[in-house]
């Protein structure tokens, strides 16, 4: 990657300002809505992103994704309702700042930490990408099978509250992903007699059903996404002292940097998303603080740490997606689907065949963050009123519009019905805590998993022991087993009664 | 008295997974090993996991801490008719799209959805479906020119604005 190439990429991305700016505005609006995740927005806009050239589609999705991560902190600070899981930790000190009459300072801290945290980690990822992208070259079919199982297991262990339920969801998704004809003989499997399933389960309807429709069905349980007290608080949200907030951010610049890297490293691990990163960063910030007892009462570091990590995750999540073809999270999965739709093949080859797209993704992210700081500061006060929508309007609009979007990929009415079926499955999974992200990633990895597994088994003439034949693979197996056993052991230790003093 | 956890709902996903796994095994029974290897590996692991969940729930029920209730799935009960209504309207929306087209279908489906969700403001019942249907028409029909089913509204607009 030369400097000319990099500068050319930056120039190209700056030229896409007309795509990036609307995406930022949209990302901010939907980011404020609790329970309305970036992947849902991207799914709703799939007809648009699938129709335009891949560079524009990626610039749009990346800007929306980053803005969405940032905006989740607005309702978290103003009304103690996180707009996304990644902003949950922001409520701990953000809302007390609002209660102390420092809402504006807290918002500015949130924006600067998000933007500069995201920007720093994006540039660091860009610098390290030539090495990170080579990672895939050391992974052959055997290792890839284990990497995929490892990713799925990590999602089940870290993201899902219940490991067993997470694993069931993941493997159920993996089996659904195998529906369709096999790679070698083209014989149909488990298609329920539908010709539309011979090419496999279409990903867009699966995504729409599992995320958007299921969440809309759950959303109906409340009249509004904020309660009456939250509504009143949102109506009273006002601008105060922006300059004071900027000054506080400057004083804590090192805090922004190191907590952003916490987010980056956690983001690279598939399944460990923004929620985990922001809580880990908050916990670490408190651990290293000279004044830990002040946390929870409205300290600036308590807003900076989770928000910086929350946006540090954005670039980290895309590393395994592009370098290995294993999405680091559900939003990355949506982006991967769009890239695949445009004919891109994920993995190290992408950096050689389509460097403009592979590196452009991160350049686009850096440019989006630069645009974002100028957009967000004057807009936040007015955007925060989005939380006042009633669910009786939101839920049907989400369901009906996303159902129409399900038609977009293959132009089959069948896909709309399929999205509804996945919506009902997703709803059941939501209500019973079977992790839908694990299920989705299973569906996404299903065909790829089969390809690698069959390739490995053909080499060994059907002997499954080939999966234990590689040193790197065996290390990965060990880590996989450890990731399963450690939480069980920790759970056992916590349940074990403490010995009595006289013992 | 301590309330028992209703774990019947927790069995729905494992039951679906097991039923699908069984159907998958049935559908690949006569195929070459390359075509069924993946299904066998994943299906076998899935069935073991489902069995582990069954044992776990069984043990909790035996210990008296849980029962086979479905409360987790249907609570809160007042939202259930709305939810079912919304799903039925969506089914009707998809089923009638061939005749009504996407724009008119969206208008009627959204009107019906808002009505069953308790919206009674005439202004909202007219303006929200009209605005959303117009956006859907502009995006999917006018801008993207997708092959989504056309109905009377699309034909009329096509005649008016060729």
Image: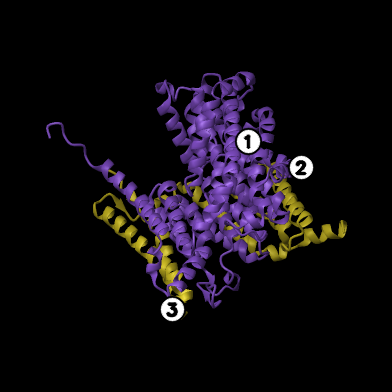
Chain colours: A purple, B yellow
Q: Which structural element holds mark 1?
A: helix
Q: Which mark is residue A226?
A: none
Q: Which structural element holds mark 3?
A: loop
Q: Report the Cα–Cα distance between label 1 and label 3.
A: 54 Å
Q: Give the image quarter of residue A376.
A: top right
Q: In which quadrant is the C terminus of chain A drawn?
A: top left
Look at 31% across and 55% down and name the residue there.
B57
> Which subunit holds the residue at mark 1?
A
Look at 50% across and 57% down and name the residue there.
A138
Q: Which structural element holds mark 2?
A: helix
Look at 34% across and 58% down and name the residue there.
B53
Residue position marked by numbered label 1 in the rendering: A386
- Residue A345 in the image, given as x and y percentages of width and height: 61, 60
Asked if marks 1 and 3 fall on the same chain, the answer is: no
Q: Which mark is residue B29?
A: 3
Categorize mark 3 by other alpha carbons within 10 Å: few (<14), some (14-19), many (20+): some
Q: Which mark is residue A15?
A: 2
Please state which of residues B31 and B72 is positioned toward the viewer in this rendering.
B31
Pick out the residue farthest to the left. A502
> Which subunit holds the residue at mark 3?
B
- Residue A67 in the image, given as x and y percentages of width and height: 63, 38
- Residue B18 in the image, given as x and y percentages of width and height: 40, 66
Categorize mark 1 by other alpha carbons within 10 Å: few (<14), some (14-19), many (20+): some
- In this rendering, the label closer to the viewer, 1 or 2: 2
Asked if marks 2 and 3 fall on the same chain, the answer is: no
Q: Is residue A211 visible?
A: no
In the drawing, does residue A470 fall left or right of residue A498? right
Q: Give the image quarter of residue B155.
A: bottom right
- In this rendering, the label closer to the viewer, 1 or 3: 3
Precedes in sequence: disc 1 or disc 2? 2
């Amino acid at each position: 990657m030369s400097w000319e190439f990099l500068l050319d990429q930056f120039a190209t991305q700056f030229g896409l300002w007309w795509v990036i700016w609307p995406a930022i505005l949209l990302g901010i609006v939907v980011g404020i809505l609790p329970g309305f995740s970036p992947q849902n927005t991207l799914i709703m806009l799939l007809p648009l992103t699938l129709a335009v050239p891949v560079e524009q589609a990626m610039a749009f999705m990346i800007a929306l994704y980053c803005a969405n991560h940032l905006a989740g902190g607005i309702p978290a600070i103003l009304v103690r309702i996180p707009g996304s899981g990644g902003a949950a930790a922001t409520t701990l000190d953000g809302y007390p700042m609002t209660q102390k009459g420092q809402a504006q300072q807290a918002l500015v801290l949130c924006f600067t930490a998000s933007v500069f945290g995201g920007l720093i980690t994006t540039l660091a990822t860009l610098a390290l990408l030539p090495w990170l992208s080579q990672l895939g070259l050391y992974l052959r079919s055997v290792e890839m099978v284990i990497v995929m199982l490892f990713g799925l297991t990590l999602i089940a262990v870290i993201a899902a509250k219940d490991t067993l339920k997470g694993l069931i969801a993941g493997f159920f998704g993996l089996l659904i992903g195998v529906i369709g004809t096999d790679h070698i003989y083209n014989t149909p499997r488990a298609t329920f007699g539908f010709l539309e399933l011979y090419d496999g389960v279409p990903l867009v309807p699966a995504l729409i059903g599992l995320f958007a429709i299921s969440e809309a069905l759950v959303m109906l349980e409340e009249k509004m996404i904020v309660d009456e007290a939250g509504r009143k608080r949102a109506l009273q949200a006002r601008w105060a002292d922006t300059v004071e907030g900027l000054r506080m951010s400057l004083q804590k610049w090192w805090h922004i940097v190191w907590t952003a890297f916490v987010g980056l490293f956690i983001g690279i691990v598939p399944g460990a998303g923004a929620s985990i990163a922001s809580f880990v960063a908050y916990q670490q910030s408190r651990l290293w603080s000279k004044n830990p007892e002040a946390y929870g009462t409205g300290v600036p570091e308590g807003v900076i740490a989770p928000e910086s990590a929350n946006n540090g995750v954005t670039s980290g999540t895309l590393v395994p997606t592009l370098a290995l073809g294993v999405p680091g999270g559900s939003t990355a999965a949506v982006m991967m689907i769009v890239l695949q739709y445009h004919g891109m093949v994920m993995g190290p080859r992408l950096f050689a065949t389509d460097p403009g797209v592979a590196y452009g993704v991160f350049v686009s992210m850096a440019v989006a963050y630069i645009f974002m700081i100028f957009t967000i500061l004057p807009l936040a006060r007015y955007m925060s009123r989005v939380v006042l929508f009633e669910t009786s309007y939101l839920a049907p609009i989400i369901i009906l519009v996303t159902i129409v979007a399900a038609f977009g990929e293959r132009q089959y009415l069948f896909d709309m019905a399929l999205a509804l079926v996945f919506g009902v499955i997703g709803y059941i999974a939501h209500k019973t805590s079977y992790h839908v992200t694990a299920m989705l990633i299973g569906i996404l990895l299903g065909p790829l998993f089969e390809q690698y597994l069959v390739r490995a088994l053909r080499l060994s003439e059907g002997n499954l022991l080939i999966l234990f034949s590689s040193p790197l693979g065996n290390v990965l197996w060990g880590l996989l087993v450890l990731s399963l056993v450690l939480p069980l052991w920790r759970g056992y230790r916590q349940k074990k009664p403490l010995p009595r003093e006289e013992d | 008295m301590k309330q028992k956890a209703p774990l019947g709902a927790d069995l729905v996903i494992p039951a679906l997974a097991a039923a699908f796994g069984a159907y998958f095994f049935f559908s690949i029974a006569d195929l070459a090993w390359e075509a069924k290897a993946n299904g066998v590996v994943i299906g076998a692991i899935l069935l073991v996991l489902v069995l582990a969940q069954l044992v776990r729930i069984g043990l909790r029920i035996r210990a008296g801490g849980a029962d086979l209730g479905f409360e987790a799935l249907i609570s809160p009960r007042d939202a259930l008719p709305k939810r079912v209504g919304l799903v039925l309207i969506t089914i009707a929306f998809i089923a009638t799209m061939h005749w009504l087209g996407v724009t008119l279908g969206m208008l009627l489906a959204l009107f019906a959805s808002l009505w069953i969700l308790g919206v009674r403001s005439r202004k909202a019942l007219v303006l929200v479906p009209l605005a959303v249907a117009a956006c859907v028409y502009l995006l999917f029909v006018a801008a993207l020119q997708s092959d989504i089913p056309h109905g009377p509204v699309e034909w009329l607009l096509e005649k008016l604005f060729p």
